[in-house]
Image (cartoon, helix red, strand yellow):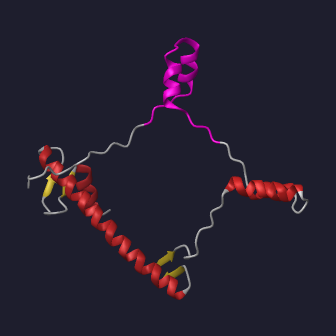
Amino acid sequence: MSALDRAAHDAGIVASPTTGEVIDLATAPTETLAAYLDGVRDLERRLREQKAMATAEVLARMDREGRWTATLGDWKLTAPSPEPRRVYDAAALRADLEQLVADDLIAPAAAARAVEEVTTLKVSAAGVKALEKLGGPVADAVERHRTLETRDRRVSVTRQRGVE
């Protein structure tokens, strides 16, 4: 970010992506901000499309050359090969491996290394809310383990039909 960009950013000054008009975020009417957000989202969409097109071209060139890491001047490009990702049915594989262990064809440790059992815990908002309603030591226990996180908030902007 240039010094000029940093100064504009710090002052809350932006440029409309559609008109180039300078907008002071603190004083602009909300309708102007809505149009600005709509223009930014349209620009983001177009940039995503262009990025996808350029990515497809780079991948095609890397695939043709059979290399997925390339250093070109100041740039280093890396990408996965086109080889399909291997996906396994973990439960079915585990069952077959257990049989192979029982048949003494592989060691139990080999089967354990191939399929790891992972346990995850997930808090149910509805369940916690019900416990909080009990109050007293139950609510206190729940409270001890709660932290509040700031939400990433966004504004939805849609153009009304028939309005230009």
Residue at 49% across, 76% down: 77
Q: Tell me where residue 152 sits by quadrant.
A: top left
Q: Can residue 10 be seen in this view?
A: yes
Where residue 163 appears, as percent x and y from the top left, is 8, 52
Q: Where is residue 142 in the image (x, y as percent from the top left)?
A: 55, 23
* Displayed quadrant of residue 122: top right
Image quadrant holding the C terminus, namely bottom left
The answer to whether residue 152 is above or below residue 147 is below
Q: Which residue lies furthest to the right in this view?
A: 104
Instruction: Give the magenta part as a residue range.
Output: 120-149
Nearest the camera: 89 or 81? 89
Horizontal placement of 44 versus 93: left or right? Answer: left
Rendered-image quadrant of the N terminus: bottom left
- The answer to whether residue 74 of the structure is visible from this angle is no
Reply above or below: 125 against 83: above
Q: Where is residue 150 in the image (x, y as percent from the top left)?
A: 40, 37
Residue placed at 52% from the left, 13% from the top?
135
In the foreground, 62 or 20: 62
Image x and y of residue 35, in percent: 16, 53
Image position of 143 with respect to 95: above or below: above
Q: Does the magenta stretch include residue 44?
A: no
User: Quick check: is 124 in the magenta stretch?
Assistant: yes
Residue that lies at the very extreme toward the bottom in this rendered image: 65
Which residue is pictured at 66% across the width and 57% down the height? 89
The residue nearer to you, when weighing 64 against 11, is 64
Quadrant of res 145:
top right
Q: Is residue 151 left or right of residue 97?
A: left
